[in-house]
Image (cartoon, rainbow, N blue to C red):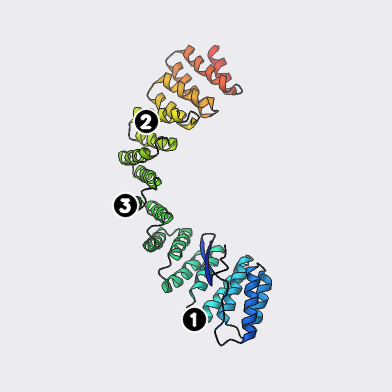
Amino acid sequence: MINKKNLISKATCMKAIFFFISFFTVCAFAVQESDALLDRANSLYQEGRYPQAILLYRKALARGADPIAVSFNTGNCLFQTEKYPEAAAAYRKAVDFSNGKFVPALFNLASVYFRLKLYPESIAAYHRALALEPSNGSGWLFLGEAYARTGDKVGTIKALEKAYEQDSIDISIVYQLSEAYIAVQEFDQAIALIRNAYVKHPEEVDFLVYLGDVYSLKKEYDASAGAYREALVIRPEDVSLLYKLADVLAEGKQEYMAMDILSQALLIKPSFSDAAIFLGNLAFDAKWWDRAEQAYEQAAKYNNKEAIYGFKNLAYEASLRKNNEEALQFLKKALQYYPEELTIQAEILNLEE
């Protein structure tokens, strides 16, 4: 949203930086008439009457108004009316009239190119702007986004690293740069970045969760479990976090410990049917049939259809052990929860015959 009280205000749109000048005044030597026209045009712009504002900007230009101001503000109006190719042309004029030195026009031009999906052109414009204003963290951030749209992972990382240099406190930049490192499997750099961010933001428990996720991607399951446990000290009843911990424990071949964690999650939230299915599957693999049955039944109570396959697997395993009575018991229990399931009915008939 445009801040109409400032000479230059910033807004972001479609993940691209955008500058607006609400009152871009002419130089002291401009004639009084062009000043008045510019003031009126700026007022129309604030009111959202963009076509009328454009007409007055053009009249002001004919009366000798600063062409940089007129071109730039005309581009802003065109952008607001979603006439992006015309807006790009207006910003290019502002850039040309300033001999390439008017930074807001360069940033806006890059933004419009981004909107038009002209990503190489957007990247080039961002580089020109950032060469003049290298401390603009938002510019680096959105340059990284433009690089990402082209699939240039190295370019994305370099741009986001520059954004991070300008503002290492911004949590969103930490996450974006970490994701960029992960995309090229630079896990250690992502881990170091996240750890440093957590030191600066100890209230951001999600950094510990994210750290656990990265360790998991790196297949360092013990380290991942440690990060999740650290987060659970602060959020002990976070069932999604308990699920993550159970997952890495299972990946690390600590299935019984994973089952204990899932049972804990289900005590906190009995309706967490995905945890019940996970618990049932682990118990099934461990040949703990009655525990698997209990878990699948809990999932079935909350209408998780994955429970159907759990009961069928139990029935199949029982039939392999020549225990058709137990197999029927599993299938009939499944039918209690899913009476319209024809495949269960068919399997029951087949066993009874």
Q: Quadrant of residue 352?
A: top right
Give me the residue at 43% from left, 72% from top: 133
Q: Quadrant of residue 54?
A: bottom right
Nearer-N-terminus badge (3/1): 1
Q: Position of residue 141 (x, y in %)?
A: 44, 61
- Label 1: few (<14), some (14–19) or many (≥20) C-alpha neighbours in 10 Å: few
Q: Amino acid at mark 3?
A: Ala
Sequence-first disc among 1 and 2: 1
For the point 60% across and 67% down, the residue is 79
**Mark 3: secondary structure:** helix
Q: Amino acid at mark 1?
A: Asn
Badge 2 density bin: few <14, some 14–19, many ≥20, Cα 10 Å: many
Which residue was labeled with disc 1? 99
What is the C-alpha distance between the residues marked 3 and 1? Answer: 43 Å
In the picture as drawn, the residue positioned furthest to the front comes out as 5
Q: CA distance from mark 1 to mark 2?
A: 65 Å
CB contact under 8 Å: marks 3 and 1 = no
Checking the image for residue 192, the label placed there is 3
Q: Amino acid at mark 2?
A: Ala
Q: Classify residue 88 as left or right of residue 140.
A: right
Task: Return the residue at label 2.
Answer: 258
Q: Which tag, 3 or 2, sits closer to the chain's start?
A: 3
State if disc 2 and disc 3 touch (CB < 8 Å): no
The reply to whether the C-beta atoms of the residues labelled 1 and 2 are less than 8 Å apart is no
